[in-house]
Image: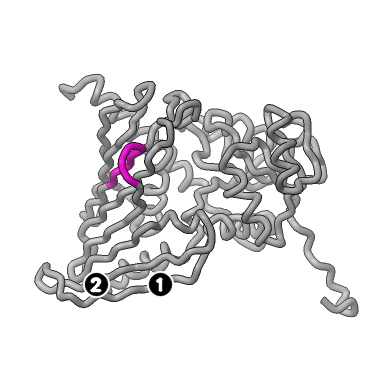
Amino acid sequence: MSLQSGVQPEAPVRLGILGCSGIVPRAVLEPAAHVSAIEIAAAANRTYDKARQMADQYGIPTVYDSLDELLADEQLDAVYIGLSNRLHAPWIRRALAAGKHVLVEKPLCLDPAELDSLEEAARRYGVHLTEGIMIAHHPWQQALRSCIQSSQYGALQRIQTRITIPARDDHAGNYRSQPEQGGGCFWDLGCYWLQFLQAVTGMEQAQFDGQSEFDGPNGCDWTFEAQARLQSGVVAEALFSFEQPYASRHILHFEHATLTINDFFRCNLGFYRIKFKVALLQKGKETGEVHQHVFDPVNYYVNQLRFFSDVVRGHQSNLPFAESAERIRLLSGIHTAARHRIMMPEL
């Protein structure tokens, strides 16, 4: 930039890491190397040694002895919360009260009763609260919504989703195997299905149902089936599992085509392409003509950090809190209804 212009470069968002869980390197530390608008400035964990080790590995300049000490750092603009799910809500409130913008790993919270207080805290302290749901940050969702709205392949009739990620060691010692900490596959993976429906079809007046045997560790749902009947009449079906082979796939059945998005999670591991495969139909049968739409390589987490930095700097509107709240209420409601059905099978 020319010194004669008199325009100073915009300072990066100074981000503190609140909780050094296993997702932090992939979700924040490695992507931050590609986002000049983010500076990882500090870290803290409930155990100091873990924060120190992560800081040494990734070059984080400051490590605090406690989470509260990090929040007291007036040089930090924002925090990323990667703590256990049950700790999200209380530490979101503390961070907001400290005047920090917050990017929190999904889910925003576990109890829908917490939602109003979180929204009010963000409003009261004049800072942004963003739920980190990485698949929202890719153009394929808007492209698919446009495809549906244009009726390019006729009316959408049915959606099938499969998100299955086999558990390593049955997630022993991990929140995913602890019911009180949001364990089970539906709380862990169902948010991605709900966000997809919000973005692509909308969920106004949709009716939901869910089933599971709850036969995983500690009574967690290790496989979960969910259904939504949308206002348009479209039926969306989803399978989630910690015990079936890996898959992350949406199949959309239109009048005149079947559109498949395979391995849509891949972009959380690096810069990869997402493909739409479209098999054309005539009178309900495949014609043999297949089209592909290939998106440029993208990393979800890099896009998410860029989005968050733009929100903090005032260059971009935040994701609607109402959408995060809707997902939390549905996750809780569908999951509770499925468990109640197991406890009272005559219903």
| Residue at which label 1 appears | 294
Residue 152 falls within the magenta-colored stretch = no
Residue 177 pos. (x, y %): 43, 28
Residue 341 pos. (x, y %): 24, 26
From which residue to which does the magenta span run? 238-245
Instruction: Answer left or right for 216 relative to 267.
Output: left
Q: Quadrant of residue 152?
A: bottom left
Instruction: Answer left or right for 97 relative to 199.
Output: right
Which mark is in front, 1 or 2? Answer: 1
Q: How is the image coloured?
A: one colour
**Which of disc 2 and disc 1 is earlier in sequence?**
2
For the point 50% across and 54% down, the residue is 268
Q: Can I make out residue 125 in this image?
A: no
Residue 35 pos. (x, y %): 67, 61
> Could you tell me which secondary element the residue under label 1 belongs to?
strand
Please identify the residue farthest to the left as the structure is shown: 283
> Could you tell me which secondary element the residue under label 2 belongs to?
loop
In this rendering, the answer to whether 138 lies above or below 225 is below
Mark seen at residue 153: 2
